[in-house]
Image (spheres, rainbow, N blue to C red):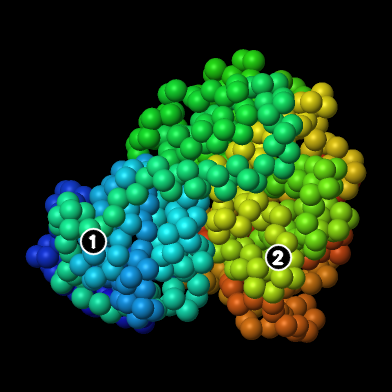
Amino acid sequence: MKLNFSADISKEELLKIAKDNLAEWKNNAEKCHGDDEFINSLDDDGIIRNFAKMIGFGTAGLRGKMLPSSANMNCETVALATYSLAMTVLEANGAESGVVIACDSRNNSELYSKLSACVLAAAGIKVYIFDSLRPTPELSFAIRHLGCKAGINITASHNTKEYNGYKVYWEDGAQLPPIEAKKVADKFLTLDMWNIPKLDFDKAVSDGKITVIGDEVDSAYLKNVLAQTVAPEVIKRNGNEIKILYTPLHGAGYKLVPEALGMAGFTSVRSVESQSKPDGNFPTVERPNPQFIAAFNEAIAISEGYDVIIATDPDADRMGIALKNKNGEFTALTGNQIALVLINYIIKSKTANNTMPKNPAMVKSIVSSKLAQVMCEKNGVTVFDVYTGFKYIGEKIKEFEASGSHSFIFGFEESYGYLTGTYARDKDGVAAALLASEAALDAKLSGKTLFDVIDDIYSEYGFWGEYWGETIITSPNFVEEMADIMKRLRNEPPAEIASVKIAKIADYSATTLKNLITGESEALPFAPENVLTYILEDNSSITVRPSGTEPKIKLYYFISSKDESDSLTKLNLFKEYFNF
C-alpha cells in the first residue's frame, strides 16, 4: 500500500492515495469485520483517516478499533505485525526457541491469536499458544518459563469494547526493547501485507508446529505468584477473618485470581457472578477499568458484609480496590493510594519478620507517587524513576540481576500496575490482588481499614495531593496537534503557574535533561521521551506527556500541601493553566 507521512501534501493528493489504497484493500483483504458496511459509510475525510496511513506500531505494538482499513486493528494488520515479528525472530536465530501467544476476553482476541500462530508457524517458528484466555502477566512469565525468544498478547487492556491490541514481548519477558521494536516497526511499514504465508491452525497443531499449552503453565505461574506473599503464615492462620469480593470485569482474571487467593488461605472470597463470565462486549460496565468507581457498581450492589472489593481489568494486569470511606460511601482508591498501601505493608512486614533483602529497591514511573519515594527513602529503600511503560521497570529488574547491585521488592505505575517479584516483567493484577488482600487483612487485624492505613501514612510522612487529568484531542490529525501543543509548551515556558514561581522545567526530549528555565543540562539516565515536568518553588510538580496509543495529552499533578482541601484548591488553579 502507498503510505504518506508528509504534512505538505495537499488534501486532494492525500485523498487520491487513500482511494487507491481503499481499492487495493477491497481487492485483497479478508473480510473479518464487516468491511462493506463500514467502508460504504466513509466520506472523503473518513477515507483519508482510514486509508492514507497505517496503524502505528509503537514500542508496545498495536492498539486500535476493530475495523477494516490499514489504520485499524483487523486480520490484515495483525498478520502483517506477526510477519514483521517473525522476520525479526528469525534474524535473531529464534526459530527453535519459539514464540508464545496469549489473549484476553475481547471480541476477536482468539481469532487474532490463532491467526498470529498460523503466520509464525508458516515462517518455520515454533509456536506455543494458550488453550484459552490468560492474564497478561502469565504471558510474560511463560516466555522465560518456556525459553521463548518472544511473546504476543492480544489485548487492549482496559480500553472500551471497540478496541483490541497486539502487545509484543522479547525473551526477557518484558515488552520489546527499542532496538527490536524498531526492527519490527520498520518491517511493518515495508513488507507486503497481501502475500503473507499462513498455515491452517488445526493442521499445524496436529503436525506439531503449534503446541497448545494450559494448566501446566498455570501451575508454575501460580507457584511464583504465591511466593510473593509477605506473611504466608499469617494468612493461613487468619485468612477467614476477612471477606473479599472480587470482580474480573468479564476478563482474564476470572479463574486465576480466585484460585490464587484460595491457595494462599483466604477462605471467604466471592466472585461477582454477573461479571465473572468472560465477555468482550463488557455488558455490565461501560469502561472495564478499575480506575473508575462505576466499574465496581455490580460489586457494590452485593457488597454488604464484605471488607474490600478488588477488581482486575480485562487482561488482568491492572488491579483496583474499592471500599467504604468514613462517610459510608464506596470509593475507589487511586493507583497511587494503592501503591502507598502496598509499599507500606511490604516495608513494615518485611522489617518486622526480618525478610527485607539487602539493598532493597523500588522502581516507579516518573509520573507516579512522590510520597512513595519519601516513604521508601525514609526506610532505607532506594528508589529508581523510569519512564511510563512497565517495560522500563522490567529493564531495571534485569539490570539489578546482572549487576547484583539491588534487590527488587516492588515496582509500580500510577495507572494501577504493580509487581512484587521478578518471575514476570510486566505488571501483575493477580499477584497485586493477593498482596492487596494481605494488606487489607493486616489492617483488619489491627482494627483498621485501608483508608485508615492511608491516613496513617499521611500522618507519618506528610500529605501530598496526587492527581491526574487528560485532554482528549478530537482532531483527525491528533498526532500533529499533540506535537504542536508540546512544541508550544517548550517554546513558551512560563515564569509561574497559578502565582507559584517555577523553579525548573525538565525537558526529557533530548539526550540530556534540559532545564527550560535556566538552560542548564545534565545527563539523562534513560533514553529521550516526549515529556515535560514543571517543578514549582513550593515543591509541587506537574508532568505533561502525550499518550503513545491514544489521542490525548496526560497530566500528572503532585501537590505539596498541608491537607486535602489545600491541595484541591491548588489543583483547580493548576488545571486552569493547562486547559489546552
Q: Picture coordinates of residue 410 (x, y %)?
A: 69, 54
Instruction: Tell me the quarter of the picture where residue 68 sits.
Output: bottom left
Q: Picture coordinates of residue 404 (x, y %)?
A: 71, 70
Asked whether residue 401 appears in the rendered view, the answer is yes
Direction from residue 19 to residue 304 in the image, left or right: right
Q: Is residue 389 above or below residue 230?
A: below
Direction from residue 415 to residue 363 in the image, left or right: right
Instruction: Tell me the quarter of the picture where residue 290 sits.
Output: top right
Q: Earlier in the sequence, mark 1 or mark 2?
A: 1
Q: Residue at x 67, y 42 (%)?
A: 229
| Residue at the spot of label 2 | 385
Q: Picture coordinates of residue 194 (x, y %)?
A: 16, 70
| Residue at the spot of label 1 | 209
Q: Is residue 83 above or below residue 254?
A: below
Q: Residue at x 48, y 34 (%)?
A: 248
Q: Three-letter amino acid code at disc 1?
A: Lys
Report crowding for label 2: few under 14, some 14 to 19, many 20 or more residues within 10 A (C-alpha).
some
Instruction: Choose mark 1 or mark 2, whichever is in front.
Output: 1
Q: Picture coordinates of residue 542 (x, y %)?
A: 72, 60
Label 2 SS: strand
